[in-house]
């Protein structure tokens, strides 16, 4: 069959195309699951300690009261931790110090890690290492509890790899859901495929999905919620999705006003009012107990640690601090850490790379605004997705204010990957409107930039840094890894968490999946 006919057939079966992208994402995320060292994922050791506690039948942790397990605490002594890691009540080493150790000493530490008594997973740490992730709702941790129970006899590092892989699987369903969301929002086949491909290729989402933490699964839940809203499906479906989200991460609180705004037209009829009440009632039945528990324990509804540290602060006093915030700096950091940030080591790329993506984002926004104006009668789905995205940004701004109230700051742009389905849809729709008949080329170029960003970040930052080929200089800057040193990458692959043959296989699958997702999407656009 002629190549064009094959591609035309692929485009005629859009859902099959979305599942091909899903497979590509899983292959990419599997490599991301073994690329970072143990505890390099944001707050990963605290998330694992939460899972261990539930698996041991010890009940929900309490913020400021529950320590991590003895197993997790001891592992923090043995393995290297991210540069600038927050204070611990005992000495620990950085990656730079780790690679300066003799090979025999590194191997001895790994053997001690693997030999930790499995019973320590159910024992509290004797040191005061409190689990600050006790602030998190429990749904994700309940999903991961079977891993600890079934694989509890394996060494800790292999359990963490399994948890990372399962987390990536839970997050991966955001890819086909993104495609379906775009189609229900009345986007073209090209736009829908581009949105799903963009979600599959974004490096930040790959890193977020493949670590132990509740942000990856949040992306799938948010996509389900958006799909229920945009497709105008049963109100209970949206209510169940909202409730599941609220029981996964507190930032789903921003979805409640967005959902109310999306359904404001239902207030015109009694039936519409009842459907809204049913949706919010279902969400309350699922998640209200958690937020009530937060209030009983911390005197705050969200239960977040920075809010619980200042429970007497009123909403008005928190918002009043907005005038003292450097908002330009906040948005700059949030954008930077959303486009690409090297996990808990906070590795960064060259500044001009971020500016290229800032220009691309500005172009997508301009195109989206033009589309919403020209096709406003057909863009209800896009408007609803944009509403959820805007309310999430408002939540990030409030998050910054709560940190300022305790003398800290936050620009955690990686949280935005919870809304990767909405973001990918809005970007693809905006660029398609901007380019007109050349939309295929512009969308393919955008996917090419995302793929290039990912490949560059992995091979010039993450892989060399995690394996000791580069490190922090005296002043704190990270050394550059040059093309002339590419012959050292085989050594780097042999130093990853997985055995060398597995690392090589996953790396090859990652490369093939990245190139395949870009190439297939680009060819499909040209057929359109």
Image (spheres, grey):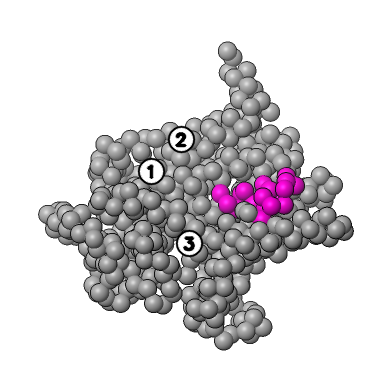
Left or right: 70, with 164 as reference point: left
Residue 122 is labelled as: none
Residue 513 is labelled as: 2
| Quadrant including the C terminus | top right
Farthest right residue in view: 268
Residue 332 appearing in the image: no
Of label 2 and label 1, which has the lower sequence position?
1
> How far apart in space, not on screen, are marks 2 and 1 (Cα)?
11 Å
Residue under circle 1? 31
Question: Where is residue 144 drawn, in percent x and y?
Answer: 41, 53
Q: Secondary structure at mark 1?
A: helix
Residue 107 appearing in the image: yes
Q: Secondary structure at mark 2?
A: helix
> How far apart in space, not on screen, are marks 3 and 2 (Cα)?
33 Å
Residue under circle 3? 138
For mark 2, does the 10 Å Cα neighbourhood hold few (<14), some (14 to 19), or many (20 or more) residues?
A: many
Magenta region, residue range = 220-239
């Amino acid at each position: 069959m002629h190549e064009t006919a094959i591609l035309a057939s692929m485009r005629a079966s859009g859902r099959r195309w979305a599942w091909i992208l899903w497979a590509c994402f899983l292959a990419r995320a599997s490599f991301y699951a073994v690329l970072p060292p143990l505890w390099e994922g944001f707050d990963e050791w605290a998330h694992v300690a939460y899972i261990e506690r539930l698996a041991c039948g010890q009940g929900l942790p309490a913020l400021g009261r529950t320590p991590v397990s003895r197993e997790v605490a001891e592992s923090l002594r043995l393995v290297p931790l991210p540069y600038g890691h927050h204070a611990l009540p005992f000495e620990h080493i950085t990656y730079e110090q780790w690679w300066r150790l003799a090979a025999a000493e590194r191997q001895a530490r790994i053997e001690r890690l693997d030999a930790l008594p499995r019973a320590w997973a159910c024992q509290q740490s004797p040191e005061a290492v409190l689990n600050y992730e006790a602030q998190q709702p429990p749904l994700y941790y309940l999903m991961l509890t079977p891993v600890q129970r079934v694989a509890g006899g394996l060494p800790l590092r292999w359990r963490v790899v399994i948890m990372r892989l399962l987390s990536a699987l839970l997050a991966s369903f955001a890819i086909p859901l993104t495609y379906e969301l775009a189609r229900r929002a009345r986007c073209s086949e090209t736009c829908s495929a581009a949105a799903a491909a963009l979600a599959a290729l974004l490096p930040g989402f790959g890193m977020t999905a493949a670590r132990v933490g509740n942000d990856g699964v949040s992306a799938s839940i948010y996509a389900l919620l958006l799909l229920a809203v945009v497709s105008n499906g049963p109100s209970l479906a949206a209510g169940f999705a909202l409730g599941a989200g609220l029981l996964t991460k507190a930032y789903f609180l921003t979805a409640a006003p967005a959902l109310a705004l999306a359904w404001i037209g239902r207030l015109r009829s009694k039936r519409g009012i009842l459907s809204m009440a049913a949706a919010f009632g279902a969400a309350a039945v699922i998640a209200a107990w958690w937020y009530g528990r937060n209030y009983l324990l911390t005197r705050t509804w969200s239960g977040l640690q920075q809010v619980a540290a200042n429970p007497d602060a009123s909403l008005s006093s928190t918002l009043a601090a907005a005038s003292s915030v450097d908002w330009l700096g906040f948005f700059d950091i949030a954008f930077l850490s959303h486009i690409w940030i090297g996990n808990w080591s906070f590795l960064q790329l060259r500044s001009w790379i971020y500016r290229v993506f800032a220009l691309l984002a500005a172009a997508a926004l301009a195109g989206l605004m033009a589309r919403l104006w020209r096709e406003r009668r057909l863009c209800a789905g896009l408007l609803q997705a944009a509403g959820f995205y805007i309310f999430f940004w408002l939540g990030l701004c409030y998050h910054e204010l709560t940190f300022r109230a305790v003398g800290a700051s936050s620009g955690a742009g990686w949280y935005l990957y919870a809304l990767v389905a909405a973001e990918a849809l809005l970007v693809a729709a905006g660029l398609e409107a901007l380019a007109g008949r050349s939309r295929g080329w512009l969308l393919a170029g955008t996917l090419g930039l995302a793929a290039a960003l990912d490949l560059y970040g992995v091979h010039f930052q993450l892989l060399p840094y995690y394996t000791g080929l580069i490190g922090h200089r005296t002043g704190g800057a990270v050394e550059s890894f040059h093309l002339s040193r590419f012959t050292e990458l085989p050594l780097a692959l042999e130093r990853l968490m997985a055995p060398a043959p597995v690392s090589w296989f996953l790396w090859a699958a990652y490369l093939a999946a990245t190139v395949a997702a870009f190439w297939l999407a680009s060819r499909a656009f040209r057929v359109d």
